[in-house]
């Protein structure tokens, strides 16, 4: 894919001023961002008093029970609906939810046992469900135009074909005047391969993949960011016997932690700078938020700055950054200022070959890390704060753990964690490709491009052969967490140097830092069909930073 030849030297995108470039500065985007490497986005400020940190108990998402296990398939049902959820103490916030909760209910799947989830859409707009990190057939991958329509929503196909017309196209529900194709370059496009259903859709997942923590979220074209912000996200685990015999912390000492930021108006409603608050027709956000939307309240499992009581023992923390655009650099700090080790045992796509110990750990939107933290040397009554070194003010705090008792601990961290990691060598690659993720122009407005082009669902950007091994070189102007659907990959290099310590293992999302290039290697196995790769800054992907991948 061709690269974007340049970026105009006037104010490009509102990201806290970091991209406020003018002709007078003479600075490139990368040089400007290197001075503020933690900032890609603009922060909303909540309009009501916020609660003190470490008061709310940490919620643990409920585990969804199957409605049937017949025929060797676990079947689930999830209703997508709007409900009011208590996030801030004493305040009921309207949210879009899976199953009436935020986060949505957790799915527990067993490796090798397929599952089917029937999603019913009772929201006011179409939805799409993507199982992020799943090795899924294309018809259940959650392609952005494979919509589930709510009752009463006009059929975009006219009832005659699978052609998808985005809301706001001429003839769509009488709202032509609201359409603004110049915003993203996507409105008005047709997708002859889209499969649209009404009210319900069955998503079937074969679960033929390494045990790991995945997550599911809305992936509707043009409106992924506000849908996730409103609550459409949940966790999905894949388990197997081999991992369960390793002796890692388990049961109540395994904690799923979905970290996300939000902001609230004076009534306790979620703030979000959508151009169309109904999320029906005009995609995108107000100009000053084009680089990403940040909130000033840090939530873990839907609670603001929560506290969790723990034993003086090892805990397994399954961490997801479910923020739209916010990056974190995590550290666990005791009352006396001592940092506890963050022992990484897994990445996006499962266990590492061997543990890697960190003192701090960066995590970008959509990345997951599997960590062990040992509270054994913290005195009873002691507080361990999980902090964000990239935050300021209240966003420096994430959550805390209070050690409340001494307890026996039979867990351990084996020196060898996994022996099934793929062995991919650069010499095995059949080709090398290069993709630039950069700001650019679309129809006279600003957007985000892959290889100089905005997303078009009707265009095939890359075609690979099933089973081929390829090296991809990825180039960024600002922060871009790049996600590949279907496949996991290994990081070969960053900026021509060795990968960083947290790049270990098999990943599906890599955090590119401002001005950085990185090389990844993957085997395109699994299934034939149409998939995606894109930036997982959700505002960026809504404004064009996606591309089609065809596996033939």
Image: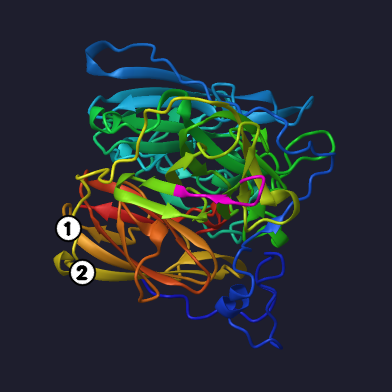
* Residue at (61% x, 63% y) in the render: 38
Q: Dot 1 surroundings within 10 Å: few (below 14), some, or many (20 or more)?
A: some
In the image, is residue 304 part of the stretch drawn in magenta?
no
Q: CA distance from mark 2 to mark 1?
A: 9 Å
* Residue that badge 2 annotates: 431
**Residue in view at x 60 percent, y 73 percent:** 33
- Report the front residue among 271 and 405: 405
- Which colour scheme appears in the figure? rainbow
Q: Is residue 337 magenta?
A: yes
Q: Which residue is mark 1?
A: 468
Percent position of residue 324, x then y: 58, 49
Q: Is residue 15 above or below residue 526?
A: below
Q: Look at the image and give the residue range highlighted in magenta.
A: 334-342
Report the residue at 29% width, 49% height from top.
354
Q: Is residue 351 above or below residue 287?
A: above
Residue 343 at x, y percent in the picture: 42, 47
Residue 352 shown left or right of residue 35 in the figure = left
Q: Is residue 472 left or right of residue 58?
A: left
Residue at the spot 59% in from the left edge and 21% down from the top edge = 100
Q: Is residue 273 left or right of residue 387?
A: right
Asked if labels 1 and 2 touch by Cβ distance under 8 angstroms, the answer is yes
Q: Is disc 2 surrounded by few (<14), some (14 to 19) or many (20+) residues within 10 Å?
A: few
Q: Quadrant of the N terminus?
A: bottom left
């Amino acid at each position: 894919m061709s690269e974007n030849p340049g970026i105009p030297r006037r104010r490009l995108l509102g990201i806290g001023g970091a991209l406020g470039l003018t002709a007078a500065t003479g600075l490139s985007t990368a040089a400007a961002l290197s001075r503020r490497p933690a900032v890609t986005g603009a922060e909303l400020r909540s309009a009501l008093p916020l609660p003190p940190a470490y008061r709310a108990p940490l919620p643990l998402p409920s585990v969804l029970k199957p409605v049937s296990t017949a025929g060797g398939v676990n079947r689930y049902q999830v209703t997508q609906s709007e409900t009011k959820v208590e996030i801030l103490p004493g305040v009921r916030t309207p949210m879009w939810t899976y199953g009436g909760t935020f986060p949505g209910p957790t799915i527990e799947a067993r490796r090798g046992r397929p599952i089917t989830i029937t999603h019913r859409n009772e929201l006011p707009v179409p939805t799409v469900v993507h199982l992020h990190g799943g090795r899924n057939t294309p018809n259940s991958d959650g392609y952005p135009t494979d919509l589930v329509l709510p009752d009463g929503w006009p059929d975009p196909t006219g009832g005659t074909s699978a052609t998808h017309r985005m809301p706001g196209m001429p003839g769509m529900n009488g709202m032509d005047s609201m359409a603004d194709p110049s915003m993203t370059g996507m409105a008005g496009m047709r997708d002859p391969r889209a499969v649209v259903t009404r009210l319900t859709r069955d998503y079937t997942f074969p679960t033929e993949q390494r045990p790991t923590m995945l997550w599911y979220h809305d992936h509707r074209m043009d409106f992924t960011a506000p849908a996730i912000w409103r609550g459409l996200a949940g966790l999905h685990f894949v388990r197997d016997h081999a991992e369960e015999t390793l002796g890692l912390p388990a049961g109540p000492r395994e904690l799923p932690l979905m970290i996300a930021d939000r902001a609230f108006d004076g009534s306790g409603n979620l703030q979000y700078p959508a151009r169309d608050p109904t999320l029906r027709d005009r995609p995108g956000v107000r100009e000053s938020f084009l680089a990403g939307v940040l909130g000033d309240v840090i939530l873990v499992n839907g609670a603001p700055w929560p506290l969790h009581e723990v034993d003086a023992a090892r805990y397994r923390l399954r961490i997801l950054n479910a923020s739209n655009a916010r990056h974190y650099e995590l550290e666990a700090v005791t009352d006396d200022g001592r940092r506890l080790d963050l022992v990484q045992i897994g990445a996006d796509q499962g266990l590492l070959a061997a543990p890697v110990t960190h003192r701090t750990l960066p995590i970008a939107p959509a990345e997951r890390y599997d960590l062990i933290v040992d509270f054994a040397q913290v005195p009873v009554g002691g507080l361990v704060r999980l902090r964000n070194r990239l935050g300021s003010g209240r966003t420096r705090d994430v959550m805390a753990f209070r050690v409340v008792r001494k307890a026996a601990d039979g867990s351990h961290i084996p020196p060898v964690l996994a022996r099934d990691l793929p062995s991919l060598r650069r010499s095995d690659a059949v080709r090398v490709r290069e993709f630039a993720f950069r700001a650019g122009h679309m129809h006279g407005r600003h957007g985000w491009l892959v290889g100089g082009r905005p997303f078009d669902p009707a265009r095939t950007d890359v075609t690979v052969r099933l089973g081929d091994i390829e090296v991809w070189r990825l180039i960024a102007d600002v922060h871009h967490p790049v996600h590949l659907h279907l496949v996991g990959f290994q990081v070969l290099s960053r900026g021509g140097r060795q990968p960083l310590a947290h790049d270990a293992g098999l990943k599906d999302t890599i955090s590119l830092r401002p001005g950085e290039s990185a090389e990844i290697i993957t085997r395109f196995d699994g299934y034939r069909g149409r998939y995606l790769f894109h930036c997982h800054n959700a505002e960026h992907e809504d404004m064009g930073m996606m591309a089609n991948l065809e596996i033939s």
